[in-house]
Image (cartoon, helix red, strand yellow):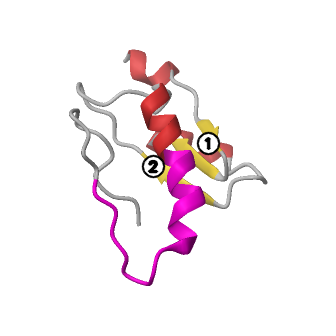
Amino acid sequence: EVQKTWPPITLGQLWVRFPWHEELGRPAEAQSELVLEPGMAFGTGEHETTRLCCLWLQETAPGLPAGGRVLDFGAGSGILALT
């Protein structure tokens, strides 16, 4: 129930939200959105490592070839894929 109090966040041009935020509408500066289904092991997306990875991907991904891949060497559950 406490998860319902977590606000959506904007990371660069990425809007990170939960399914119950759908009615809020995407902010104008957000070109993409990531919808999280939070469980006991995944938080709000506000952890500094998550923030830095999302910002880094936004800077790096446009330079990757089509179908390019990025490997996450993280030790936690992490973000497994963004499509």
* Residue ID for mark 2: 35
Count every numbered label the image shows and give the total.
2
* Residue ID for mark 1: 11
Of the 4 image quadrants, the one containing the C terminus is bottom left
Q: Residues within 10 Å of mark 2 (few under 14, many from 20)?
A: some
Three-letter code, disc 2: Val
Q: Nearer the viewer, mark 1 or mark 2?
A: 1
Residue 29 visible within the image: yes
Q: Position of residue 41 (x, y in %)?
A: 23, 27
**Depth order, front residue of 66/18:** 66
Q: Is residue 27 above or below residue 77?
A: below
**Pointer 1 or 2: first along the chain:** 1
Q: Secondary structure at mark 1?
A: strand
Q: Is residue 52 above or below residue 40?
A: below
Q: Is residue 77 above or below residue 15?
A: above
Q: Position of residue 78 (x, y in %)?
A: 29, 40
Of the 4 image quadrants, the one containing the N terminus is top left
Q: Position of residue 30 (x, y in %)?
A: 69, 54
At 67% from the left and 53% from the top, the residue drawn is 13
Three-letter code, disc 1: Leu
Q: Which residues are magenta?
A: 54-71
